Image (spheres, rainbow, N blue to C red):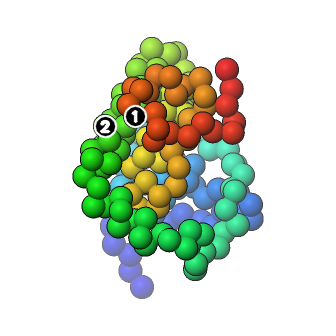
Amino acid sequence: SKLDFGVIIFSNPRPGKKSIPERIANGDLDGDLYLVCWDKEILALLKASPLVDEISYDNGTLSTVPSNPNWFHDAQDILIDAGFSNEMDRLTGKLYKLGEKIADGSESLLKHPDANSYYEAYNQALEFKKHGRPITLPGHLIDKIPANLRHLVVESSDSYC
């Protein structure tokens, strides 16, 4: 068999560990695009960090029954509520901008823990309409969210100061 040019193949993760796409900016394989660069001049300008094994909190199996028995009704409510959708869009943008501001002002850039927390919440906000999972942030970061949007965010259990 012949593969198309540009196909990227990822190996399966070791049991209990996250896959490579999950470790690349919390990605998955539902249409994400990856850039593979072989240009030595560009690569010489980058400082790469090694990809380390991360524990997966997923047992590797897909649930066939949603954990929320009212998931379909809840999804309909989210999709038809334009005001809520507008709030989610504003929160999504705010989370991105807060992460960007911290990363731009830090020597550790995207590795700054607060920037990372905002970007994780940003990803959760993007996925909210699809999965309905809560958007979480450490408690000390929630006060940076506009007061009228804070009800959309839940304090994470791994808060640190």
Q: Where does the C terminus fall, quadrant-wise?
A: top right
Q: Which residue is mark 2?
A: 90
Which of discs 2 and 1 lies nearer the camera? The answer is 1
Q: Amino acid at mark 2?
A: Arg
Q: Is residue 135 toward the left or the right of residue 125 in the image?
A: right
Question: Which of the 4 image quadrants contains residue 129?
Answer: bottom left
Does any portion of residue 102 appear in the rendered image?
yes
Does any portion of residue 62 appear in the rendered image?
no
Q: How many numbered circles are shown?
A: 2
Question: Do labels 2 and 1 touch, CB within 8 Å?
Answer: yes
Which residue is found at the position 60% from the left and 58% from the top? 19
Vertical arrangement, residue 145 with respect to residue 157, above or below: above
Question: Which of the 4 image quadrants contains residue 95?
Answer: top left
Which residue is found at the position 29% from the left and 55% from the top? 81
Which residue is found at the position 41% from the left and 70% from the top? 73
Instruction: Kindly give the residue lying farthest to the right in the view shown.
Output: 15
Disc 2 on helix, strand or loop?
Answer: helix
Q: Position of residue 147 (x, y in %)?
A: 42, 26
Which residue is found at the position 69% from the left and 48% from the top? 54
Q: Nearer the viewer, residue 105 or 6?
A: 105
Q: Which residue is mark 1?
A: 149
